[in-house]
Amino acid sequence: MSKTAITTSSAPAAIGPYSQAVRVPAGDMIFCSGQIGLDPSSGDMVEGGVEAQARCALENLRAVLGAAGARFEDVVRTTVFLADMGDFARVNAIYEQYFEGVAPARAAVQAAALPKGALFEIDAIAVLPG
């Protein structure tokens, strides 16, 4: 799939590994539900704090994308939910390892509470070539 980063100096520049917007050709769209740091084999939250939960949630997202025939490269939009916005920089460093090349458009939000007491959650939209 070909995706193009859209940038403009008329809006604030991206302050992390994301694009202001992403243009994609029409194709199959995949809307992924939020993933948290649950170990898929045990159903328990992984230990190790927000970094471990972020890695696990991103691996869970990789599995969901893979089941749909997609990869991280096909993701055009994510939303990251944090229990504490103070964790943003640590999570951003991990997120950046998963999304290379044209980074997806993204929003990051501090949530009052996340499922199962999670510290991190991510959802995604991917587009497969049509």
Image: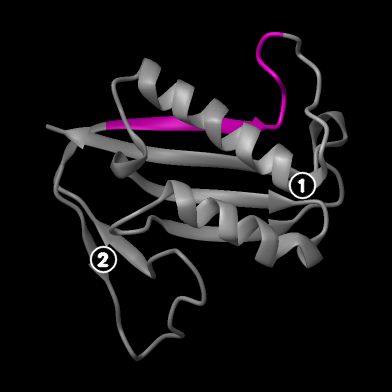
Q: Is 3 included in the stretch rendered in magenta?
A: no
Q: What residue does disc 1 label? A: 50
Query: Which three-letter amino acid code belongs to the residue tagged 1?
Result: Val
- Residue 94 vs 127, above or below: the answer is below
The answer to which of marks 1 and 2 sits earlier in the sequence is 2
Q: Label 2 neighbourhood size at 10 Å, few (<14), some (14-19), many (20+)?
A: some
The nearer-to-camera label among 1 and 2 is 1
Please provide the residue range marked out in magenta: 29-41
Q: Position of residue 76 (x, y in %)?
A: 35, 49
Relative to 118, 58 lies left or right: left
State the quadrant of the C terminus. top left
Q: Which mark is residue 5?
A: 2
Depth order, front residue of 5/51? 51
The answer to which image quadrant residue 110 occupies is: bottom right
State the residue at coordinates (82%, 58%). Answer: 84
The answer to which image quadrant residue 109 occupies is: bottom right
Q: Label 1 neighbourhood size at 10 Å, few (<14), some (14-19), many (20+)?
A: many
Q: Position of residue 95 (x, y in %)?
A: 54, 52
Relative to 69, 59 lies left or right: right
Q: Residue furthest bottom?
A: 10
Query: Which three-letter amino acid code belongs to the residue tagged 2?
Result: Ala
Relative to 79, 62 lies left or right: left
- Residue 29 vs 15, above or below: the answer is above
